[in-house]
Amino acid sequence: MTLDPAAAPLEVDPLLDDPQTRIIVCCGSGGVGKTTTAAALGVRAAERGRKVVVLTIDPARRLAQSMGIDSLDNTPRQVKGVEGSGELHAMMLDMKRTFDEIVEAHADPDRARAILDNPFYQSLSAGFAGTQEYMAMEKLGQLRARDEWDLIVVDTPPSRSALDFLDAPKRLGSFLDGKFIRLLMAPAKMGGRAGMKFLNVGMSMMTGTLGKLLGGQFLRDVQTFVAAMDTMFGGFRTRADATYRLLQAPGTAFLVVAAPERDALREAAYFVERLAAEGMPLAGLVLNRVHGSGAARLSAERARAAAENLEEGRIVDQGRGKDGVREAAAPAGSSPDAPEAPAASRKPDPSMSEPPSQPPSVNQLTAGLLRLHAERMQVLKREQRTRDRFTALHPEVPVAEVTALPGDVHDLAGLRTIGIRLAGEDPVPGTS
């Protein structure tokens, strides 16, 4: 039984052209081309007249290189060389700098300095689990609040799970609301002798144990951080909730990016289901790096059989083939039809210690190409089966297939080509 639900094609250009579309979130598992897809969407939208900013969280800095920018940082920078009437800006999330900006914006100077200098805060802002995803949400909220761009394209973090981007605000909120944090905040809230009494009586065992496990100085750093951040915890939760609602609102579109591989599409299917459960607007699936062939009508089985026939000599060239080469090599005055001299009567060439290696024959080269084609057709068949499984489970999800390029994308021209293929305008359909 062949599964071929023929999912509706994803129409990328109408999505980019719609002035109501203000945010596009590219999500998916790691290594499927989210960064390239986000950048290509930004280039295409800008060249169709929109003012776009692309926010990437990719530490490999491929986005900066492909856009001809020396470096990206926490400030949007305009990309030169964009054709058309629009503008393209790009930025890379600086997780710690974004956290610092939040502290500086929502605390008085003395309290902000105490927080920024706190060792526990420095560790938290640089590498706490979920901080990168949360700060990506914060930066998205900041960009949208400025209302400076027509369209914001977000490249989600290269996380172990594609769901981390959605879960980050809740995880950080759970951390800030956790019992451990509330216990550490209690003495500061009670203040004075009451606070000291509470600390001495109610927390002496806990702090003593934690001090042995974590170190007394570390525990004091945490308590100082919690006391300084107390008034800001509510703000974190409020902004996280606001950004979460922004992701659910009309004008936001999620694009799930996947490769035509079983694990990537399984993750994509899980994400599609999660987005539906959370009420988030899904625009469709981008199936990236799809292989193709210009000779798709020649099946793998037929190509392999033809290669075997050539290698076993069952396919005979009826023409003269390379007879002309042999004629040219024959001694002057000899007849091409004359029998070859016996090996014993031929004089060896003293200048050659061993016979030269012969180049592969036409039959050998043809057989090799046929086997390569058979392998390619097997890849295409496997990719199609994997895609069919996804579309059978989710026939309502529009799909855009992007054929693989022969090399890496490293400039605007390459991003422009990806954008053309995203829009279904592949200049050479079915090629790779």
Image (cartoon, rainbow, N blue to C red):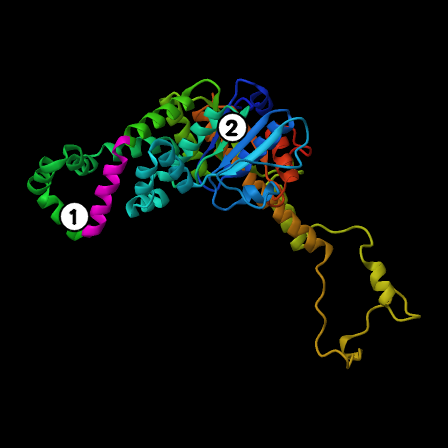
**Residue placed most toward the observer, 291 or 179:** 179
User: Where in the figure is residue 326, as x and y percent of width and height?
Assistant: 83, 63
On screen, residue 71 above or below 387? below
Identify residue for label 2.
152
Of the numbered discs in the image, which one, if any, rests on residue 210? 1
Name the amino acid, label 2: Ile
Farthest front residue in view:
110
Of the numbered discs in the image, which one, if any, rests on residue 44? none
On screen, residue 147 above or below 215? above
Check the picture and name the quadrant holding the C terminus.
top right
On screen, residue 426 above or below 21? below
Name the amino acid, label 1: Leu
Judge whether residue 103 is colored magenta.
no
- Magenta residues? 214-231
Residue 337 in sight: no
CA distance separating discs 2 and 1: 44 Å
Location of residue 351 (image quadrant):
bottom right
For this view, does 154 lie left or right of residue 207?
A: right
For this view, does 25 lie left or right of residue 87?
A: left
Task: Check disc 2: other Cα within 10 Å, few if <14, some if 14-19, many if 20+.
Answer: many
Q: Residue at x 70, y 76 (%)?
A: 354
Return the disc, 2 or 1, that comes first in the chain's sequence. 2
On screen, residue 19 above or below 175? above
Judge whether residue 218 is colored magenta.
yes
User: Where in the figure is residue 259, as x and y percent of width and height?
Assistant: 50, 37
**Residue placed most toward the observer, 339 or 42:** 42
Q: For the residue labelled by badge 2, is the local secondary structure a helix, a strand or a loop?
A: strand
Q: For the residue labelled by badge 1, is the local secondary structure a helix, a strand or a loop?
A: helix
